[in-house]
Image (tube, grey):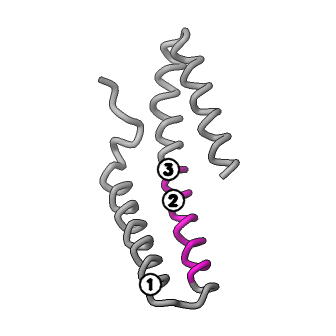
Amino acid sequence: MTMPGYVDEKSAVLKRLRRIEGQVRGLQRMVEEDKYCINILDQVSATTRALQAVALELLNGHLAHCVVNAVAAGGKEADDRISEASAAIARMVRS
């Protein structure tokens, strides 16, 4: 089985995701406590940016590892990995 592109950064990615999980719990608490809407929206924006940063890190790992290896091997797998990466980038840009 091929190792994922983020394997060297796995603990850092998990740490960031746990922090984001805490941010989401904080958002839930803010709503439960009827906090001011703008303050909640500010925290939603911060959480969104944190998720985008994780996505970019994962994408970078994918490009540097999975796509580079597939391109070096050539053939259909290279085309598939490039198409896959392009589609992922398109989804990220749309969100």
Mark 3: which amino acid? Glu
Which residue matches tag 2?
Answer: 51
Question: Where residue 54 appears, x then y in whole percent?
Answer: 48, 55
Residue at 41% x, 37% y is 5
Instruction: Tell me the element at label 1.
Output: helix
In the image, is residue 43 part of the stretch drawn in magenta? Answer: yes
Within-10-Å neighbours for mark 2: few <14, some 14–19, many 20+: some
| Labelled disc at residue 32 | 1
Vertical arrangement, residue 31 with respect to residue 19, above or below: below
Residue at 42% x, 66% y is 20
| Labelled disc at residue 2 | none
Which residue matches tag 3?
Answer: 57
Q: Main secondary structure of the magenta part?
A: helix
Q: Is residue 56 left or right of residue 18?
A: right
Please tell me which residue lies in front, 31 or 49. Answer: 31
Marked residue nearer the N-terminal end (2 or 3): 2
Residue at 54% x, 24% y is 81
The segment highlighted magenta reads: 40-57
Quarter-wise, where is residue 39 in the image?
bottom right
Instruction: Tell me the element at label 2.
Output: helix
Mark 1: which amino acid? Glu
Instruction: Tell me the element at label 3.
Output: helix
Please tell me which residue lies in front, 93 or 13. Answer: 93
Q: Quarter of the image containing the N terminus?
A: top left
